[in-house]
Amino acid sequence: MKYSQKALNISASPTLAIDSLAKKLKEAGENVIGFGAGEPDFDTPDNIKYAAVSAIVKGYTKYTPVAGINCLKEAIAKYYKENYAVDYSPDEVVVSNGAKHSLMNVFFALLNDGDEVLLPSPYWVTYPELIKLAGGKVVVVPTTKEKNYKITVSDIERYATSKTKALVLNSPSNPTGMVYTYDELKQIVEFCIEREIFVISDEIYDKLIYDGKKHISAASISEKAKEFVIVVNGVSKSYAMTGWRIGYTLSNKELAKIMSNLQSHTTSNPNSIAQYAAYEALVGPQDSVKKMICEFEKRRDLIYSLVNDTKFLSALKPEGAFYIWVDISDTIGKSFEGKLIDSANTFAKLLLEVEKVAVVPSEGFGMENHIRLSYATSEKNIREGVERIKRFVEKLT
Ligand code: PLP
């Protein structure tokens, strides 16, 4: 075989087709409204930017310890202690080049060939590809709208085998915006610990949670959680720092060491300057985060009511992150000017062609008949974009 089978097994990003079509249309001068963004549309707060400038001026521009500078690891441990009442020491923290990189470290450190990973769907598009790359087998655990797109212990019981090594949880969820309650999480985590199944808890949207609710960390569920729970988080979403590339894991010491060894031969330390910026993000003033949450909550309310006011569309109210997961089942089988809507993919393509609105179809997230809309865009765009979607669906016959 000419190229690596492992690499060939990786699918292209499912958002790419729509994205490149949207870009082409924009370049051609079309007025495209994009609901595809996976990042806050806010600027990185000034105090964080200045911390980076100061790091450069002070000459913090050399290699750092592989798993991150000590003050940042301490700040991460403190953040989890203060926010979620869990105890981690700095040597249980591994700082990486974004949460995506942290997830890669986790899968490579945990999986042997053929190990099964339970992945509730809809899932974030990157999980299955990383699991496959690391030699694991993806076992999709489907959820339903009726159960708020969440899994329960009975789902795990149904899909777990003797080869099950880990479960991926993502709360608040990309793409559904759903959040697990303490009780739901407790049942799942305790069940997994009993069966010695690792819980990979992607908490990247922990701060972006609405209605006065508070994120629950899977690591806070029980004393024993630390042995089997691996927390993945980062500064990308909560501090509008997607381009800085700082993510991290919290795990038991043994696994942290393995991931650090892995990282020492792949990327070495994450960017030194970005680490100082991330430190400031965690220990500096938090008012910009609060403002961002307030703004996202307003937009969430707006998009939720506009979408549910639209013929054939319905969505549950997102509780966190900045996405709304819209059920378009009632449009499937209908036609737009003679063109049959047979899938979310076709719906998204036609919507972009006809009304110049870019949305992400659900197939890449492991579910049919939904579209994901990101509300990390202005209120004006939300109003205009949903208006166009309305116009589109009203023409379906
Ligand atoms: N996990 C989830 C659920 C995400 O949605 C994303 C980004 O879209 C990431 C992880 C990756 O975050 P980072 O930019 O820190 O790599």
Image (cartoon, grey):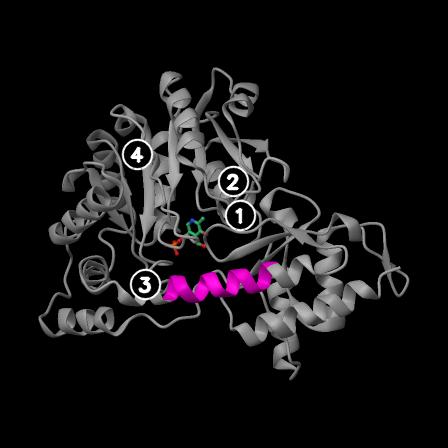
Q: Which residue is mark 4?
A: 219
Which of the marked residues, 3 or 4, is nearer the chain's N terminus? 4
Q: Is residue 47 above or below residue 63?
A: below
Q: Which residue is mark 3?
A: 289
Marks 1/2: CA–CA distance: 7 Å
Q: In the structure shown, which secondary structural element does the residue marked by tag 4 occupy?
A: helix
Q: In the structure shown, which secondary structural element does the residue marked by tag 2 occupy?
A: helix
Q: Which mark is residue 16?
A: none
Which of 212/282 is in front?
212
Q: Which residue is mark 1?
A: 125
| Residue 273, x across and y down, in percent | 20, 65
Give the magenta-colored segment's residue range. 292-304
Residue positioned 45% across, 35% down in the render:
168
Mark 2 vs mark 4, foreground winner is 4
Q: In the structure shown, which secondary structural element does the residue marked by tag 3 occupy?
A: helix
| Residue 110, x across and y down, in percent | 35, 30
Q: Quadrant of residue 58?
A: bottom left
Q: Quadrant of residue 170?
A: top left
